[in-house]
Amino acid sequence: MPAGAARGAYAVRQAPFERRLLSVSGVDRLGAYVVLRVADPTGPVPEPGQFAMLATREGWGGGARERPYLPRAFSVARHRDGESHFLLEDVGPGSRLLCQLEAGEMLWTLGPLGRGFTAPSGGRRAILVGGGVGIAPLAIFQDLLRDDAIVLLGFRDGPRAEGASLLDGARVATDDGSAGHHGLVTDLLAAELERDPMAVVYACGPAGMLEGVRALCASGSVPAQLALEAGMACGFGACFGCVVPRRGGGYVRVCVDGPVIDAAELDHVDVHAGAPE
Amino acid sequence: MSVSFCGLALAHSIINGSGTFDAIAANRAFAEDLRIDFPFAAYVSKTITLTPREGNPPPRLWEAAAGLINSIGLPNKGLEGYLAEDLPKLTRMRTGAGPGAERLLVPVVTNVMGSTTLEFSKLVEACDAREEIAALELNVSCPNVKTGLDIGADPLQLELLVRAVRGLTRKPLIVKLTPNTADVAACAEGAQAGGADAVSLINTLRAMALTPPAPARAADRRAWLGGRTGGLSGPAIRVIALAQVAAVAERVAIPVIGMGGVQCGAHAKELIDVGAVLVAVGTESFREPAAGARIAAELEAIGTS
């Protein structure tokens, strides 16, 4: 079993069986993104890679607004000083309401949910590969790993690339060349794997990027853990909606079997894997 | 406030709709052991089929206006896997204690679906042999599977199916009706004539969503869901459920389980006021996993005020 690949060894912190009304303690702009800081001094400390279902208290479901109706899943980006941080991008009715929250307002949270990353063992180095808003779970994971990890982040453009400051020491690639390497983050990963073929890769981002990471790692027999995204209704295994195809047939539920899934369990990262708004 | 349903003693009148709560997965996700604090008065399983099913290809969900379209496709371990692996984990669950409420055992209702009468018969016979199962629910109404729809949408076909399996079990037999039919009350009468002990409704309404518009390729728009169409649930269907439950309760003498878009105790009370004995909660549990217990408490508060 390759390092960090042991199925069943993923980090899981169980959630209270209730959604909790928590207070926004601060909102930070980070280029095209918003970092939502939520006061949660008494809740369970999430494991890197775990997520929570979020919904604003006001204006969510019912009333004049017909959408959003269901809560939205967000990876925990950081947990420190009794606050959980979430990285948001306004891409639809749900994320828009969350982006509009201000300090002192309330939101519903259910979590932490799902299975997180497993740190590398045997002295192997971690390479964190993120794309867009998907860099979020890598930040909390870097907090755990401290200085040891190599961080490679890809973004569409300059305003989004400002999100790279969420992590320390990141090397950046942009689609439009406005910051860092002009090209794909997988270009940076390929070069890094040539230098250190014994590394373990941890990735989160859009489905196309994850598929690139998966294929690259598979060709070099590099163990990889992928934090997947899927539109989900519940987050705790009830709706069976957030499935992705598993190698050898059948499906896994992203919410309870993931969101962190060993790349070896997938034939490919399904193009529909990311679709929440 | 305890409730009697087909000879079963239930702690309150709120149960889950089939396929909307996975008690085993919930026990993995949450810190408290749900077996000693279960939100529903009875646990209705996902639909079990004779052989295992993987379910429909993704995408399986679409958020609609005040609702959800799902095209899950009944993934399950099959009869053998359910009886051997899942059923033993579903026993000994107890309801949470509300104010002054008794902690009662949560009976397991097993929902089954066959594609033929013979398959239904095998499922019912096998479940009848297991004492952990308190009651059976026949899924004749799932809009994702053509065969289920056909049987449940026709009163006579439905009567014949229920009659064929009625003799195979003495456990309470609930028929889950489809709303995708011309006359749901006539289908309920068919189920009653065939020997059903109760009917439950409404299942999801057949619905569809398209891929997002791509102006350059307008002709390429196609069904969003992997199963092409799906079933609509949530607040969007509540008033339709109210009308159908009322129509059925007027026409049959057997108990009715009402469901569809219930979000709070007042919604449950409406279904009870038109004749439902129990109320099932489904999509609301996706937003709030403990919704069943909350709605039961709200309903009790309404009843005693």
Image (cartoon, coloured by chain):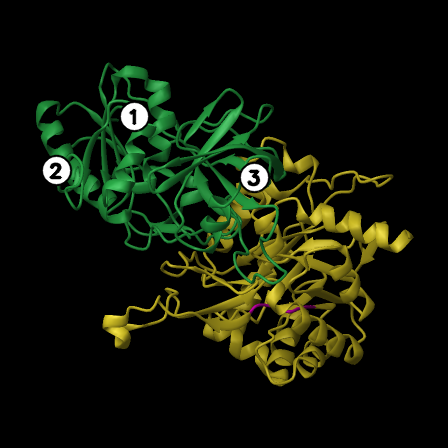
Chain colours: A green, B yellow
Q: Mark 2 points at which residue?
A: A187
B250 lies left or right of A170: right
Measured Cα–Cα span from mark 2 to mark 3: 37 Å
Count all numbered tags in the image, as a single digit: 3
Secondary-structure class at tag 1: loop
Comes first in the chain, label 3 or label 1: 1
- The numbered mark 1 sits on a residue in which chain? A
Comes first in the chain, label 2 or label 1: 1
Q: Are marks 3 and 1 on the same chain?
A: yes
Q: What stretch is highlighted in magenta?
A: B200-204
Q: Name the residue under label 1.
A: A4
The relative height of residue A77 versus residue B42 in the rendered view (above or below) is above
Q: Which of A112 and A182 is in front in this view?
A: A182
Q: Name the residue under label 3.
A: A109
Q: Is residue B79 magenta?
A: no
Write down the quadrant of residue B168 in the picture: bottom right
- The numbered mark 2 sits on a residue in which chain? A
Q: Nearer the viewer, residue B113 or B34?
A: B34
Q: Are marks 2 and 1 on the same chain?
A: yes
